[in-house]
Amino acid sequence: MKTSDMTKMTYRDAIRLGITEEMRLDRDVIFLGEDIGVYGGAFGVSKGLLEEFGEERILDTPISEGAIVGTAVGAATTGLRPVCEIMFMDFITLGLDALVNQGAKMRYMFGGQCRVPMVLRLPAGSGTGAAAQHSQSLEAWLCHVPGLKVVTPSTPAQAKGLIKAAIRDNNPVCFIEHKMLYDTVGLVPLDDEYTLEIGKTIVERPGKDVTIVAYGTTLAKAIEAAEFLDEEGIRVEILNPLTLYPMDMKPIIESVIKTGCLIVAHEAVKTGGVGGEIVARVVESEAFDYLTAPIIRLGGLDVPIPFNQELEAAAVPQRNDFVHGVYRLLNRE
Amino acid sequence: MMENEIILPKEKLDMVAENLTNTAAAGLTGTIKEEAVLQDDKSEADLQEAAVDISAETVAAIPSEAAVERTEPGGDIAVEDPADEYLQEENLEEKLTAAIEALERNLEQTIKEGNKEQPSKVLREIIKDEVIEEPQENPLEPDPRAGKVRATPAARRIAREFKVEIDKATGTGPNGRIEVDDVKKLVVIQPGTFDYKSKEPVVIKTSLDKIAGNPSNLFSTPVKLEEIPDKKTVTRKKLKDMNQKIEKVPNPELDFVPFVDENDEKPETKDADVVTKISALDFVPFVDLKAEPLREEIIVKPTPMHLLYESESEDQGLKNRKSRGLPRKNQAQDKNKNDIKAATSVPTVTEAVVSDSNEVTEVNEVNEVNEVNEVNEVKKEIIIDTVREPLRETEITENTEITENNEENHEEKIVTRTVRPKAIRKYLIKKKVETAVISLTTEIDMTEIKDLRKKITKKIEEQARYRCTYTDFLLLATSRALVKHPLINARREDDTVVAHAHVNMGLTVESDHGFIVPVIPNAQTMNFVEIVKSRGDLLKAVKNKHLSQDQLEGSTFTITNLGMYGIREFTAIINQTNSAILSVGEVVQRIRIHQGEPVVRSVMKISLNLDQRVANGVDGAKFLQDIKADMENPSLLLF
């Protein structure tokens, strides 16, 4: 794609652009959530949408996640394409029944006679000093439910491509945004039809010595670490599984076969995290025979995210954790 | 009773049984019949059963009771026995104590011998008062790691693939973990039996003894392996970095000594450094005889001349002189613009040039600028020597370029030199000091290939979209031969030789940045069309500057070709990390004896420069023989 077809914008604007484009293209797309209309959303993602699309399609809802998700599931089964914003991912617990027991199962239970084309936007992650109830990364829960798709973009371009693909998808898609990424800037294609295929892992940075699988903010930290290690002659390959479920394991397995070393990182709590699943699948695969060192998982500590920002940073993987992890894999420590 | 069973060897059983019967008899005086019964039992070998049931309690504490028990089962059988009188005569007390002692002894013995097999619990019950309890009391939990090998999965896989016993490896990883390299050190493969199934490079049997220069090595030619001290060169480099002028002060002693002095630090240059200026476009090897090769462009480093052209080629000599003449002319007229033809004036002292160039080459090697510019450097240095001006980066390679040889140009060149990518610098030729090289040359009859090529060119062009050249045939033949001779397709690491499991064929090509070696990976798996295609793609990438870093890395063997410039035969410096390089000369028509008659045949000379420390001359010769066989019977290439 030519750079002339792209423009620099923030992650936040890229999501808004994706939703706007889809709402223009398809009259069935509606957007609902708490404070998304007049206020423009807790993080400002939906600013200006009310003016363009009106109250019929931009719905300010009561403070009830159960109501939002339930409405969305119902609307989706009757033919609309709802996009709903859960203000913080932590609040998804209130809407889980409608999502897990209804939204994710309907197509299966009704023998394929109905579909649930809905998108849940879930701002997740720590770093804002919002403490334990507003900083969690709960993607592993959602990945545990067959019938849901879970995607997580890490750059503005990916955000636009994935939100559009999610809206067009005929299944419930959980679109996990990281709050700390909202202000990151990147080139975003302006093409109306630019989408990213759901279920594709991409190579963010080619290398040959160590494979790192990371997403969200950990991806940026991994890239920082890779740049640091580059100066020492260590070439780190970084993969970004844009879709956490169903995950495309092939590039990861191929990369591990190439490098023999693997680090899997995410901000979510390590125990029961998605990283464990990735590691298990790698070990189950042919790549096992090519491992030259024990796999390293970098994840959040098994604690509630602290309020104190120093402690908050200490609870999730940082750049140095990657660097030391790589050293450990290569026996340099 | 059952749980107290002790299984005893048969002889002992008999003994115990006898004792038992004796005791029983002594205990129950007058019960002669029963005693007799026992005796009978014994004779019928039934006693074994009874003996097995001996419990320590019964025997040691209340022998008489035990005897009663023993005797009971046999009580029904009434048999007369003549031995009763004899028994009554004995002193019963003595007999009893003796029997008990014997029994105890037996038991002890049994316990000691059977210690390991018997559960401690039983033993304790048998001998309550004995103190054998401590060792068995707390059996240690066995260490789950005991007897296990600590190794990475990859190390295990390699051990499996090469059928190496992994427990023989010495682990160098954390906590003695066996790593991939540790296993590879165990893999020993005889040359010629190499199996290319694994993708891993392996170590081929070798040791320091095998390295050339060691007198015990049969095949080694006496090559001086003594390292020229690096320190000197390093300081030079530093000095030069600090002040460019330092190096440029001419040293008349060095410059004008016609022969290289023994004390001189320079290594003996054994092979020819031939460097050419070829544009990537022109890399169509084996130019047809009719076509005029671009002879003016040959630039030959003066030193190895005598090695280079062993025979004939007057015109070549002329050319060399021409190229050597260039700097002279340049020196004379310095920055004046000049036409090449004016430069026919031959340098006054050619000998001086030789020695001078030696000196200068050394400097070049220090600088790691050992490329095309080598020769230019030579010229440069000469210029500098005389002019004493920092014309460091003069690039006067092409005759046509010379006209633009003014100061502005110099500055430009300097800039381009400094920004030269690291990638290319990696491929600089290794210092000759570190290698012990032998050269082997053979002549290949190309007539059949020529015919074959005529026939298939069109077909191949349709499929591969590139014209096939003789190089493609040679690539195919070489990669097949390399599979058979892994030692040629190897690299040296300290005191081991690592043979590559794949043939990554490097081709020397001239690019804008100088001499580079793009690589055709996994050439051993390719058929002819694939080779034509990948070579074409590669050269196209060089031409369009689309070459990626990967395409420049990892060559395992190199082919260099100067045939298109009319070079019949030459040798080249081995590319770093390779162990050999194949130099390809021109295809010429010569009269050869073919099937008993002198006929005109197309022939080509190829030379192999081989690092003696990796493979010996015989290996190289066999390798060339295989190539020759394939090339002269191209139908063999089908198989």
Image (cartoon, coloured by chain):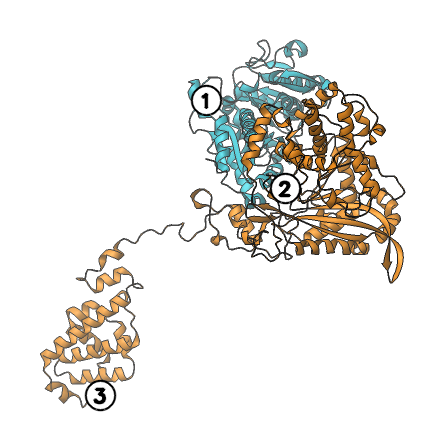
Chain colours: A cyan, B orange
Residue at 77% across, 25% down: B332
Mark 2, other Cα within 10 Å: few <14 / some 14–19 / many ≥20: some
The amino acid sitting under disc 2 is Lys
Camera-near label (1 vs 3) is 1
- Identify the disc placed on residue A313: 1
- SS state under label 1: helix
| In-image side of B379 versus A263 (left or right) | right
Mark 1, other Cα within 10 Å: few <14 / some 14–19 / many ≥20: some
Q: Nearer the viewer, residue B503 or B45?
A: B503
Query: Where does label 3 land, which residue?
Result: B79
Do discs 1 and 3 belong to a common subunit?
Answer: no
The amino acid sitting under disc 1 is Ala
Residue B517 x/y as whole percent: 70, 38
Camera-near label (3 vs 2) is 2
Q: CA distance from mark 3 to mark 2?
A: 106 Å
Q: CA distance from mark 1 to mark 2?
A: 54 Å
Residue B468 x/y as whole percent: 83, 44
Query: Where does label 2 land, which residue?
Result: B432
